[in-house]
Image (tube, rainbow, N blue to C red):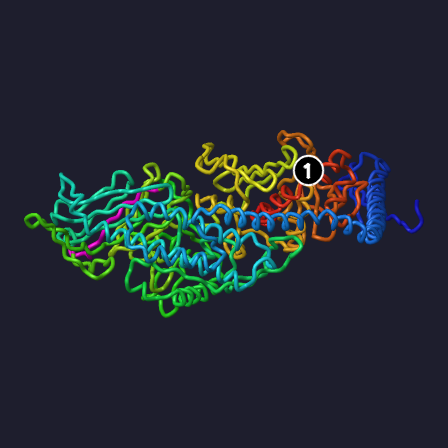
Amino acid sequence: MSPGLWWGHTSSAVSSSWPLTARWTLRGWSVSREGKGAGQGFGAPAEALLRAQQEEEERLERERLYQERLEKLEAKYQGERESELAELHSLEQKFLSAQHWKMDYREQAKWEHYLSCDGTPDPTVPQEINTFMSLWRDDQDVDVQLVMEKKEVVLNLIEKLEFLLLEAAPEEITDTQRDQYQEVILQLQDLLHQKYNDATQNLLKIASMYEDSETGNMHTVLKDKNVTFCIWANLKKKVRFKDHVFQDAGHGFELPLSLALSSVAVRVLHTNYDHLSPLWVQCQGLPRPGASDSMELAEHPEDTGQEPGEEAEKGREEPSVPAAEEMGSKGRKESSASLKGTSNNTDEKKETEEETEKNSDILDAPSQEEEALLQEEPGGREEAPQVVDLEQLVPVGGVYHISALQLPPQAQDVGNWTMVELLDVGLEVYPYSPGQAEDGTREAVQITLGLPDNVIYFKVPVVGRWDPAGQWWRTDGISKITYEAEEKSITFSMGDFHTVALLQDAHLNLPYQAWELHPTGVDEGLFTITAVFATIQIRIKDNQCMLSSVVVEEEEVLSHITGKWMSPFALRAALKRAGVNIFPAEYSPKYVPVPRKAALAEVKAYEQMALLAAAFAFAHSKWNGEAGPEQVVFKVSEHLTAGSAKGNHWYLLMFNGEKVQHLKLTETSEAFSEKLEDESQFHSTLYHMVKDSASNEAMDKVERAGFLFIDSVYQLLLATRVLAYS
């Protein structure tokens, strides 16, 4: 028996014969055992205790050796850190090369535009763009078709300025230029809509010339890829013609009795673009007042943590309302800034109701989802308008300008003369005040809108109306909403005529279910994101991206934008316009229940993943959420073939922006652990970590990777933020 151990033995007979119960005591431990005879089987408890003691000693020894190993690895890591970072810095020069290439490309494009002499202005040159706007503003010979043709030029100018504001490095344009470009965007948007008003007025002056033989009224539809222009003129004022459907567009209306007997015209102008919401909504990525900097990520790795100068908030107004036109650009900015001051105080996370099961639902009152996503204007609940929180609900599918217009005097034939009364006024809104219907309720205008084929609504959209006075979207004043998903239409009632938009939750496809990035060739790759409702595949080649597919419920959709090469910024804009928003904003953590990740770990990971993307595949790990806010965890695998990465040998890396380690953990492990893989070590960069086990061919591909491809991968990773939202 070992020194220091003592044993105590007691026995008692429970009857006049066996069995007996023996109790052995080992310093407070007791073991009971029944035996058939004296002294039989008393060695087993001691053996078990000795074995447990031995196992505990072995565990402590292993921990001691593991800690010694960690100390040695930490010392080695610190000693090699400077040289590793220097080697990484050499690779990071590719980002700088990409930035210089883009600057040179823009300068070359400006020069080629100058040489082309195609008659369009350079929107960055004040003299040229001001002359363009002045000449068009003074041009009185306008009709709808001409405006629709000129609209393509205007939209192209606006797009150039938006992409310049998003892509240009902070040092490339000054704050003054940034403000100037944003002001030009606003002026072009207002001028374009004013031209639609002028063309509408000219058309209504001669409405009787296009009288329909069946109804005696006038109606017409003009459409192209960006605009659908529908107008109806009530020439005969007959009650039985109080409703109308524009067959070529799918839009329609039913007027109250009082309007059916009035000299009124109804216009439905659907624009696939949104020129009313503030610029930070129209063009995600532009800074706005009040935005938190805590989660901002760098557009360029070398400028991590820096943000361009903030713009003055620019609200938008509806120019077709004469009273609203009196508000200048300054007034729009002030009212919009006031709104955002209110909205930024609403930091509570909103809850959404369960997805609607039926394709057709009638919503006579605001749903729980709508109420949860609305802000209330300070000053009391009863009179507060239901203001839309544009951080969560965004217009999808463009804007529908629905207007009741005063029908101008029509031409009259008098003998051989045609006479018309000329009024020195612009387009006038019809002074309509809702009266009482026959059942005693307030009269309402019923509107039916055909939804565009190039947009996806994953849930029943919220109908919002534009308030030109408050410079915001609201949901009050709209009722009896019926959404027909199969027929792609929505019907609702309004007490007055309003500009409306269909709003969708900007975060309904977040968080991601999975993601994967792998190379498919020389400076080519495939980026796949599995979101809540859709699976998106994006091909990357040099400085271009192509939407390969968008699959919803096993069906490919959005064929109008798939298969087209464009810049990462253009792709982001195209997907957002189509209703597929997989691009979180700085305020998204308020609405998406995911663990926060430190910006340092995120940015550095995206940057270094992009540097390795020519020869390595990366993918989602379920342990990323368990690693805490300072660490990101993802799967890595060498990938040298053009095929799928499904059969790859994956391993897990954990990175905090300064140190990376190879985890012993696997996706099938039962619990998260930071324990190191055997024979692995700490490194300062992902590059040096994968180099430990990579082939020479893989590292050669990394060294030869083109800087444009690397930059495109980085921009996509940064835009989607897969390490924070999956």
Identify the element where label 1 is drawn. Answer: strand
Frontmost residue, 330 versus 113: 113
On screen, residue 196 versus residue 574, left or right, reads left
On screen, residue 44 versus residue 228, left or right, reads right
Q: Which region of the structure is painted magenta?
A: 437-451
Total labels drawn: 1
Q: Can residue 389 be seen in this view?
A: no
Please tell me which residue is depicted at 42% across the width and 52% down the height of the picture. 394
Asked if the stretch drawn in magenta spans residue 308, the answer is no
Image quarter (top left, top right, bottom left or bottom right) of the N terminus: top right
Frontmost residue, 654 versus 306: 306
User: Looking at the image, is 391 positioned above or below residue 208?
Assistant: below
Please tell me which residue is depicted at 57% across the width and 54% down the height of the picture. 168
Please tell me which residue is depicted at 67% across the width and 32% down the height of the picture. 648
Residue positioned most to the left: 415
Q: Where is residue 377 in the image (x, y as percent from the top left)?
A: 38, 66
Crowd rating for badge 1 (residues with CA inside 10 Å; few <14, some 14–19, many 20+): many
Residue positioned most to the bottom: 379
Amino acid type at circle 1 is Phe
Name the residue tied to disc 1: 616
Q: Position of residue 479 (x, y in %)?
A: 28, 52
Q: Where is residue 31 in the image (x, y as percent from the top left)?
A: 79, 44
Q: Can residue 611 be seen in this view?
A: yes
Q: Position of residue 666 (x, y in %)?
A: 69, 39
